[in-house]
Image: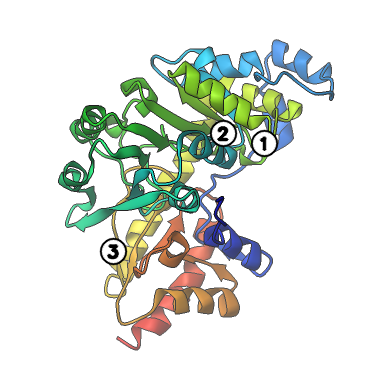
Amino acid sequence: DFMKFREFKLERLFARYETKAKYRLSQVACAGWTMKEILDMADDECKKWWDELSLGYNDIRGFMPLCDAISTRYETIRPRDIIEVVPEEGIFIYMNTILDPGDEVIVMQPALPSLYEIPRALGCKVIRWPLEVTSFGWKLDVDFLAENISPKTKLLVLNNPNNPTGYIPIRPEMERILNLADRNGTWVFCEEMYRGMEHDPAAALPSVADLYLRATVVGGINRFGLPGTRIGWLVTKNRQLLEECASYRDYTTLCSAAPSEILATIALRNADALMKRNHDIILSNLELAEKFFTKKHKKLFSWRQPDGGAIAFPLLNKKFDVTEMCEDAIENHGLLIIGARAYGMPDNNFRVGLGRRDFKDALPVFHGMAKEMEKQL
C-alpha cells in the first residue's frame, strides 16, 4: 500500500529557477568553503588519511574519527550512538523505520516538506502544530500540544532552529514539550541542522538527543559551510532503533563517500572557526535585513526576528499575493524568492536566507521591486 510522494515543491522551485537566478534571496545554505581552504586546515593525521585514501568501498559503520568528532558536538552522545547519512536520507530512513500506516504524527509547522510529507505518504494521520505570530516574534503554543498529544501519538516532529522562521523555544518550553512526549510514550524526531547558530548565545539549547531517551535527531555539515559533501548524521541513544536505521540504509546509500568523510572530519576538528565565519556573515546580513524590513519598507512587510539559523520568514502585506511577487522577482529581476506555498502553507510569508555573502547584492534589487509595489499602497 505504499503511497506516492507529492512533489517536493521547495527543491523543485530551486531546480526550475536556479539557472535564471542572478541573486538568491532565499538560499538557506551558508557560504561554502573551497577544497583548498579545508585541506589547508587539516592536521597531520587528516593529511595522511587524505593522501592515502583508497577509493574502494569504505566502512559501512562510518568513519570512526568522523563519528568521534561528531560526538563532541553533543553533551552525552558517544560515537556508537551515531550513524552517518545524507541529511535528507536520514529523515527518509528514520520515518520509514519507525512509522506504520495509521500512526498518528504531530509535526511543527512550517517545516521542511519532508518532515510532514513522508509521514503523509506512509499513510499516517498528520496533525499540524502551527507556529504563531506574537508581538515578540514567533511562538509555539505548547497548550496546543498538550490538548492534541495522546498515547495514540506515535511521533512528534520538531525542527530547531526552525526552518524557515528561525524560531527557537526557550528551555522551559522544550522541557515541557519533552515531558508531554514522555508521558504519552511518544517518540521524538528533531531536525537540528543549524543548532549552534543561535543569534544570542544564551538561547542555545542542548540537543534533543541529549535531553530525551526516545529522541532521534538529524544533524549535518551544512552550517559549517560544506553542504556539498552531503555528510549528515542520525543520533539516538536507542540502540535497537539505530540498528534498524543502519540496516535500512543498506537499501539507500550503503556508505558515505570516502573523500567527503575526511573533509567533514577536518571541518569538525575546526568546527568553531568554521562556524564563527558563517555566523558573522549571518549576523551582519541580519542587521541589513532588519533595516530593510523594519525601516525602509515597514508598510509593505512585517518582520519577525529569527532566534537562530540562517533564515527568516517575513510577511508580505495582504494587498499583494506572495506567489505573484515571487514569480515577478524571478521572471523580471533574476531574484529567487521562495514563498510559503513551498512549505505547503497558504500564508503570505516568504523565506529570506541570511547565510551568503551576496545577500547585500540581492537586497538593492529587492528594494527596487518593493518601491514599485509601495506605489500601489
Residue at 49 percent across and 19 percent down: it is: 240
Quadrant where the C terminus sits is bottom left
**Mark 3–mark 1 contact, CB under 8 Å?**
no
Q: Secondary structure at mark 3?
A: helix
Q: Position of residue 178 (x, y in %)?
A: 26, 30
Q: Which residue is mark 2?
A: 221
CA distance separating discs 3 and 1: 37 Å
Disc ID at residue 229: 1
Q: Quadrant of residue 320?
A: bottom left
Residue at 63 percent across and 14 percent down: it is: 65
Q: Quadrant of residue 297?
A: bottom left
Q: Quadrant of residue 135?
A: bottom left
**Mark 3–mark 2 contact, CB under 8 Å?**
no
**Within 10 angstroms of label 1, few (less than 14), some, or many (20 or more) residues?**
many
Q: Which residue is mark 3?
A: 294
Mark 3 is on which residue type?
A: Thr
Q: Position of residue 267 (x, y in %)?
A: 60, 26
**Mark 1–mark 2 contact, CB under 8 Å?**
yes
CA distance separating discs 3 and 2: 32 Å
Mark 2 is on which residue type?
A: Ile
Q: Earlier in the sequence, mark 3 or mark 1?
A: 1
Q: Position of residue 146 (x, y in %)?
A: 17, 41
CA distance separating discs 1 and 2: 8 Å
Res. 270 in view: no
Pick the residue in front: 319 or 110: 110
Residue 125 position (above or below residue 239): below
